[in-house]
Image (cartoon, rainbow, N blue to C red):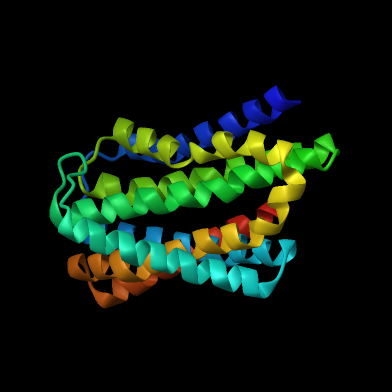
Amino acid sequence: MVWTVLGYAVLTDLATALGAVPFALVRTVNERWQGTMTAIAGGMMVAASVFSLAEEGLRFGSVWLVAAGLLAGAAFIAATGKWLEHNDLPFEHLTGSAARQSWLLLLTLFAHSFPEGVAIGVGFATGEFKTGLLLAIAIAVHNIPEGLALSLPLRAKGVSVAKCAWYAVLSSVPQPIAAVPAYLLATAIHPFLPFGLGFAGGAMIFLVIQELVPDSLARTTRSETAWGFMAGLLFMMVFVSLMQ
């Protein structure tokens, strides 16, 4: 069963790369569309945080654990952002604020993938193979728009489609890493799921407000930023509801 859990977790990770596929048809993105695409990604991330992560966390445990996770996730992004401001790490060909935003986006989704990996392991640990399988499929499908959300701003900044797909897969590597230990230690890890899911949600929401929305406003109009955000939020909300 351990190899089965690992196999399905690896497949959920690889599914994230499918989010970069549409950009194989898009050669260049002008400034206005860069802003709109960034706003769409922000809306998708906020919707995933509220309607998937936080809601799922409430099913596993106390609202206080979820709230603590939300605050911890926001604090993590705030601290990481300050550290990156003083340590200008390049990201591909990007530097400065563009590189910082890309690093934060990747790190946020990376952290967000740990509780999803844990969820896969716990699903199989219930003793019902069907439960684990359905959960793995749902996460795999959910990973596709997450890969899209990651690829949107990266592609808009000129990162290649192949690199977007690679970073999408990298962002979900924690899923196969966390799935097997979670399966083996399900009873011990289970109480921490609400906090972990809240942490991922808080990190994404803070990132959107601090980085993605201002970046979008700098590239396009306030109206287009707002409508882009709404489009991304509604898309992900409907997507998540259909997967439940």
| Percent position of residue 177, x then y | 55, 35
Q: Position of residue 184 (x, y in %)?
A: 72, 36
Q: Is 35 or 131 nearer to us in this picture? A: 131
Q: Position of residue 55 (x, y in %)?
A: 65, 66
* Quadrant of residue 84 within the rendered picture: bottom left
Q: Is residue 193 left or right of residue 144?
A: right
Query: Which residue lies at the image location 65% right of the left edge and 34% below the top edge?
Result: 180
Q: Is residue 11 in view from this perspective?
A: yes
Q: Residue furthest right?
A: 127
* Quadrant housing residue 217: bottom left
Q: On the picture, is 29 further left or further right than 64?
A: left
Quadrant for the C terminus, please: bottom right
Q: Looking at the image, which residue is at 85% across and 39% down? A: 128
Asked which quadrant contains residue 242, the reply is: bottom right
**In percent of the image, x 29 and y 50: which residue is there?**
103
The tally of labels here is 0
Residue 94 spot, x, y in % from top left = 16, 46
Viewer-proximal residue among 67 and 20: 67
Q: Residue furthest top?
A: 3
Viewed as shown, does residue 192 lie left or right of 145?
right
Quadrant holding the N terminus:
top right
Q: Is residue 56 above or below residue 94?
A: below
* Vertical comparison of 84 with 172: above or below: below
- Residue 171 in the image: above or below residue 85: above
The answer, for residue 232, to whether it is visible in the render is no
Q: Residue at 22% of width from left, 68% of height from top? A: 220
Q: Nearer the viewer, residue 43 or 99?
A: 99
